[in-house]
Image (cartoon, rainbow, N blue to C red):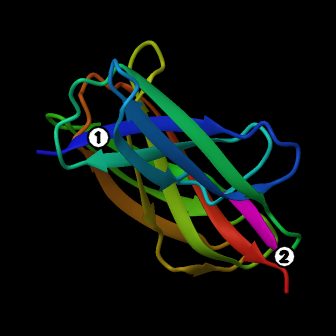
Amino acid sequence: GAAYLNGEVWSGIREPVDFVRITANARDAQGTLIWTDWAYAMVDVMEYGQRSPFRMIDWGVLTDIDTMEFVVEWDTAGPSHIGQILEVISSRVVSTGGRIEYVGEARNNTGRVVEYPKAVIGIYNGPGQIIGADWTYGSPTEVQPGETTTFSGSVSGYCGGGGLYLLQVVADYWDW
């Protein structure tokens, strides 16, 4: 079976960042590296204070972990790559036996044509710890100002108990 490592990063950088890469290193009690993996933040371009989930999958069994360290790397988003947040105008999130189904629609109120809208969802337990995450692209993939994109997806393999969620729809704007 697979074990999921769900986490969340937030940007404390005053300018937009992209390609946020998280590397996880697990060590046993003797300090020996026993597992490593990496993932990108699910939100492609992050503004100051913005949160993004990430998820790593281990196809083995994560046992004997004593410490886990995380290394976060990023690039400063250039002036031509601008992240845009779209307005979620309707959404439905349903939990069914260890699986979260989500569906919704988001409007482009940015005044710009945006591409590749992406719905990103983080699932949280009562104390606010992230326990599941997923993303999916919306349709259509190019959204004119004032138009909408629709999306649907599911989060499986999380440890249950999630009643809180953060749903964001983001898109890319390229100013060439």
From the image, tell me which residue sits under label 2.
80
Point out residue 164 in the picture as x, y percentages from the top left corner: 43, 27
Name the residue furthest left.
1
Q: Considering the numbered disc 1 on the image, is that residue within a helix, a strand or a loop? A: strand
From the image, tell me which residue sits under label 1.
4
Disc 1 marks which amino acid? Tyr
Point out residue 71 in the picture as x, y percentages from the top left corner: 59, 40
Measured Cα–Cα span from mark 1 to mark 2: 34 Å
Note whether residue 131 is visible.
Answer: no
**Can you tell which of label 1 and label 2 is closer to the viewer?**
1
Q: Quadrant of the rendered structure where residue 132 is?
A: top left
Q: Is residue 153 left or right of residue 87?
A: left
Residue name at image x 50 percent, y 57 percent: 119
Note whether residue 1 is visible.
Answer: yes
Disc 2 marks which amino acid? Ser
Q: Is residue 36 left or right of residue 9?
A: left
- Tell me the magenta residue range: 80-85
Q: Is residue 152 left or right of residue 21?
A: left
Q: In this view, does 27 lie above or below 83?
A: above
Residue name at image x 78 percent, y 65 percent: 110
Q: Considering the numbered disc 2 on the image, is that residue within a helix, a strand or a loop? A: loop
Name the foreground residue: 13 vs 156: 13
Quadrant where the N terminus sits is top left
